[in-house]
Amino acid sequence: MTTDELVPVLLVGHGPLASGLRGAIEMIAGPQERLEVVQLRPEDDIEGVSKRLEVALRKLGVEEDGEAVIFADLFGAAPANAAASLLRHRPNVEIVAGMNLPMLLESLLGREGVSARELAATAVSAGRESVRDVGEVIRSALAGAKGAGGDG
Amino acid sequence: MSVNHVRIDNRLVHGQVVVTWLQAERADTIMVANDGIAADDFQKTMLLAVKPPSVHEVILSVDEALAYIKDPAHANEQIFMLVKEPGDALRLHRGGLGAKTMNVGNMAFAAGSKRVTRTVFVTDKDIQAFKELHNEGVELTARMMPTDRRNDFMQLLSEAKLL
């Protein structure tokens, strides 16, 4: 696998969230290539964040018409809006808001030989499916085990 | 017999295993071999309820694990086996598991344990079990991720001056 075939990924969020997510991803799945992180600091304006996203995309080798997926933490908030503003001159960049760890793991491990558009769609459904009520899962499993005679 | 991988990891089934290892080892079955968990209905039910949906998972005592593996009914399963500590790995080996290699994943710090790597800490009892596994011909590696180099775990113990 050459790194050129991997869809470049950029994470952007409030404060240390994006770099924290990268730390968690690499703890689980090992070091990742073609992945950059940008953070919104309390003193930043949206233009400043957009500029840093531009710098990060260039660092990832993404040309003006190139593909990439930007993951932002919160729809409608400054990091996601800064990413959205890039669409003015970067038509092939995808932006997914509401990033979470399972969504990012699935996306980063499945970004070989797919388009940015496909990766964004996968990310959205993986992110949605990943939210689970653990208490409910365990309580119903326990109830099922009891009903089945205890040893299930 | 179809145990693709034996991992000594006191977190048992966790993120690294589920996200990277099962696929890398082409496993379709997770086997947790641990006497304590196998005897604890709550833990067993909980672990099974949160298992990855695409794989089969069994939680067995060490003795049951050996019986399971030797049962021809399970001959076609591609098993990823997890044990919490090297003492259990040694019991499996002596019971006829037949794995040529075992891999050390995470071993958390415990009272009296000594550091081998950033993520592996061993007690004197663990060291003894590793020595016996090694002397009985089991190759011991230390890989957190499937992409890691096949570090020789005995070499790491020796470098940490624990042999």
Image (cartoon, grey):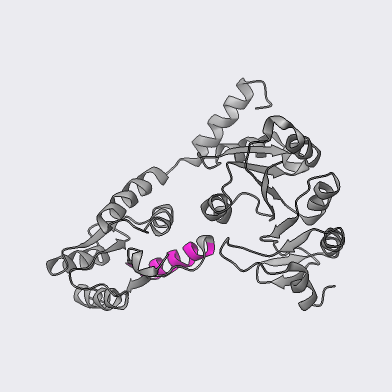
**In magenta stretch: residue A44:** no
**Residue A137 seen from this side:** yes
**Percent position (x, y) of residue B20?**
53, 55
Nearest to the observer: residue A79 or residue B139: B139
What stretch of residues is rendered in magenta?
A11-27
Quarter-wise, where is residue A17 in the image? Answer: bottom left
* Main SS class of the magenta portion in the image: helix
Q: Quadrant of the C terminus of chain B?
A: bottom right
Residue at 52 percent across and 39 percent down: it is: A135
**Percent position (x, y) of residue A13?**
33, 66
Residue at 39 percent across and 55 percent down: it is: A110
**In magenta stretch: residue A26:** yes
Residue B124 left/right relative to B103: right
Quarter-wise, where is residue A66 in the image? Answer: bottom left
Q: Is residue B45 above or below residue B119?
A: above
**Percent position (x, y) of residue B60?**
73, 38
Residue B42 left/right relative to B97: left
Residue B20 left/right relative to A15: right
